[in-house]
Image (cartoon, rainbow, N blue to C red):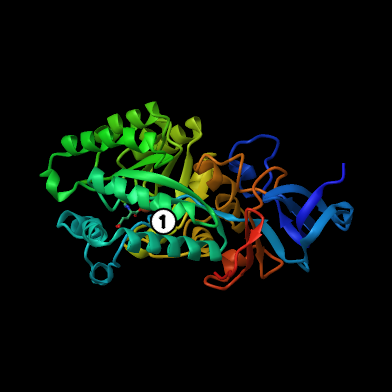
Amino acid sequence: MIKQADLVLHGARLLTVAPLGDEHPRTGAAAGDVGAIDDGWVAAHDGAIVATGHGSSWQRLDLILHATVEDTEGRVVMPGFVDPHTHLCYAGERWDEFTARRGGSDYLAILERGGGIHATVRATREASDEDLVAAISARIGRAAASGTTTIEVKSGYGLEPAEELRHLRLIARARASAAVDVSPTYLAAHALPARAGGDRRAFLRSAQAALATVAAEHLAEGVDAFVEKGVFETEDVAPLMHEAASLGLARTLHADQLNDVGGAAFAARIEARSADHVSRASADGLRAMERAGIVAVLLPGSALFVGYPPADGRRFVAHRVPVAIGTDQNPGTSPLEGMPTAIALAVTMCGLTPHEAIVAATINAAHALGRGKRAGAIVDGRRADLVVLETDDERELAYRLGARLVRSVFANGRPLREASS
Ligand code: NIG
Ligand code: FE
């Protein structure tokens, strides 16, 4: 059957990152298989990929009138990046804390004194709905311009459930007008709000009570919590996570970021979609993640900015734990923007190979967001989310840190107006 197409990119070094006979995230020896086709092409119609091939066989496609047909002249064409972990709903930047930390102040000690996350909470509470929607949309737009076509956005700077719900509703507004796919997450337990008077259990019960509204209004796909020494313990958040599961919401965690608190094993126990950061995860934790098939989302940006040892990606690959990477973009621990930078850091700091980092930024990250069958790969039937790089060697993404390598971006088969990285 001759297929209709309204978009064809040919003459490409095509990285399909196509599933290897199954729909699981890539692990172990397959963790770096990008499914490359030299002199390849991809065709799309109405926002979906309809065919891929090699050489000049694209000429047999039935091109609709005004179809976009581009000879990419050997450039890399790859799936749009999937950023599985961001905190884009906030107001205010944290220059003072950033400067103080450079002078030796400790991240958790600042938080304990009512700064850190609490400083962003205060600034965000003061911000109007309009200003917050504009800020979220601008951040999503910049991510898209650097090649991200699926992005997770967490709440988490409201702390009190009513304010968290306001943030989730504003994320929904930004999502409705975004050119790329947005996956919202309710970060229900990020820090204990000052007004909770130190009562963790009562606060977590109120967060748990908000889940019914979150589910009924489809305000989030998943629920997140920060399990860390002095913040929340795994046992504190277990009821919240079980309630999330019973409402059909996915679970994810900030786990073992600064200290090993058993977060990785806990993520396996609650059948989380992913366990994120995991820089301090124990070998037992990794084994539990492998058995349960939990994706490890590595976030080297925060290790770089806060100055703690990054996750060792080689351990995860050796344990056959699926690895994804994200920006963790937030005003406190990771102000970095754009997945190309996250890829470069995952290679230089976490020890992934460039190809493992590309897999981690596409198909495995899609799995971390429950989109393993819909995004993150150039396969017939998937959304036509594509990035054209300004290079014929994808390893350059990991090599030329900070270079502008994203030439153009297609989200849902449509070109984004401007692309830069
Ligand atoms: O992923 N560690 C917890 N949450 C964020 C940082 C939040 C903040 O400092 O504003 C993170 O690192
Ligand atoms: Fe985070």
Rendering coords of residue 297 (x, y %): 46, 47
Q: Is mark 1 within 8 Å of ligand 2?
A: yes
| Residue located 42% across and 53% down the image | 173
Judge left or right: residue 310 versus residue 55. left
The relative height of residue 71 versus residue 230 in the rendered view (above or below) is: below
The relative height of residue 262 versus residue 14 in the rendered view (above or below) is: above
| Residue located 87% across and 45% down the image | 2
Please say whether residue 282 is visible from this viewpoint.
Answer: no
| Residue located 52% across and 46% down the image | 323
- Ligand 1 sits in which quadrant? bottom left
Q: Point out the residue furthest to the left here.
A: 197
Amino acid type at mark 1? Asp
In this view, the residue in front, 97 or 319, is 97
Quarter of the figure with residue 398 = bottom right
Rendering coords of residue 343 (x, y %): 53, 60
Rendering coords of residue 349 (x, y %): 47, 60
Q: Secondary structure at mark 1?
A: loop
Please say whether residue 419 is visible from this viewpoint.
Answer: yes
Judge left or right: residue 348 versus residue 101. right
Quarter of the figure with residue 98 = bottom left
Q: Residues within 10 Å of mark 1 (few under 14, many from 20)?
A: many
Q: How many marks?
A: 1
Rendering coords of residue 320 (x, y %): 54, 39
In this view, the residue in front, 215 or 322, is 215
Q: Quadrant of the C terminus?
A: bottom right
| Residue located 27% across and 34% down the image | 208
Q: Quadrant of the N terminus?
A: top right
Quarter of the figure with residue 131 = bottom left
List the residue tagged with mark 1.
328
